[in-house]
Image (cartoon, helix red, strand yellow):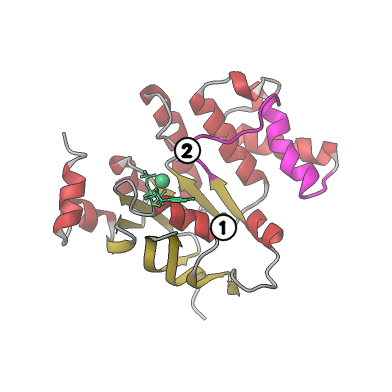
Amino acid sequence: MMDNLLEIRNLTKSFGELKVLKGISLSVRRGEVISIIGSSGSGKSTLLRCINLLEEPDGGEILFAGQNLCDPGTDLRRLRERIGMVFQTFNLFHHRTVLENCMLPLTTVRRLTRQEAEQRAMEELEKVGMAEFRDADADNISGGQKQRVAIARALCMDPEVMLFDEPTSALDPEKVGEVLEVIRRLAESGMTMLIVTHEMQFASEVSDRVLFMDNGVILEEGMPDQIFRHPEKSRTAEFLSRFRK
Ligand SMILES: Nc1ncnc2c1ncn2[C@@H]1O[C@H](COP(=O)(O)OP(=O)(O)OP(=O)(O)O)[C@@H](O)[C@H]1O
Ligand SMILES: [Mg+2]
């Protein structure tokens, strides 16, 4: 058995008549950082959502740590704890403090005591530089701060892989850097990550591998240098040219 944390084989997904994933195969090694790029509607979010079963795949297999996610016997809740996800729009709990946002999954899902949960939450809030905002209302902090809290909340559950779906797309430009910095440190710490992003410079710096998705397939993949500097497919080159101004 190779050291693949995630193994996706011929994954397909349609919404009605619309074929969104047309046979995706992908192996992710432990500790690998993969960026996923591609135009709007190419299926990037759907792929991530299938990986933690927010969407149910139509066909194919997803093996996570050797376990087939689509098996009827799979404990979805337990599995989702092992897969952290961060969304474009943060999805924090409203009318709750920063600290409560991080504690909630720990007390409800993990059944930690409040004291244990607070300790664990503060560790992760420290790492993303949000400890001093622990008592702030999560609705009243900046977008960059919200996203750092969302990342801390996911990390509290000790996930084995982190899925990021355009984590900086909803941010004011001046807030992008602080979030990318947190993700960069996470990459350096050895976390396995799949990152959907349009931040090409960032992707080229942190990724071990870059996937270009087009129209429901992985059209091209390779090392960042290869994809960003020497793409083989004209579709990839055309897509990337839109980001070079
Ligand atoms: N729940 C859904 N019901 C119906 N259609 C959907 C659903 N989710 C996604 N789609 C459609 O599937 C296609 C792929 O969507 P997806 O969100 O995966 O693309 P994407 O690559 O993430 O795009 P973007 O860059 O805009 O986020 C789109 O045409 C979208 O409208
Ligand atoms: Mg998307």
Question: Are the residues tagged 2 and 1 within 8 Å (C-beta)?
Answer: no
Residue 88 appears in the rendering: yes
Left or right, 172 with reference to 146: left
Q: Nearer the viewer, residue 106 or 45?
A: 45
Residue assigned mark 2 = 88
Task: For ligand 2, tell me if the residue under mark 2 lies within 8 Å.
Answer: yes
- Looking at the image, can residue 192 be seen? no
Q: In this view, does 86 lie above or below 62?
A: above
Asked whether 128 or 85 is in front, the reply is 85
- Mark 1: amino acid: Asn
Q: What element carries label 2?
A: loop
Q: Does the magenta stretch include residue 100?
A: yes
Q: Which residue is drawn at 50% across and 51% down?
A: 163
Q: Residue at x 80, y 43 (%)?
A: 107
Q: Which amino acid does label 2 sit on?
A: Gln
Image location of residue 122, percent across then percent down = 70, 34
Between 204 and 169, the residue placed more toward the observer is 169
Q: Residue 210 carries which label?
A: none
Q: Where is residue 87 in the image (x, y as percent from the top left)?
A: 51, 41
Residue identifier under label 1: 52
Disc 2 residue crowd, few under 14, some 14–19, many 20+, Cα 10 Å: some
Rendered-image quadrant of the C terminus:
top left
Residue numbers of the magenta segment: 86-112
Left or right, 65 with respect to 111, comes to left
Q: Relative to 96, is 220 on the left or the right? A: left
Where is residue 208 drawn, in percent x and y? 36, 57
Image point (52%, 21%), residue name: 142
Compute the Cα span from label 2 to label 1. Answer: 16 Å
Q: Where 152 falls versus 189 (above or below)?
A: above
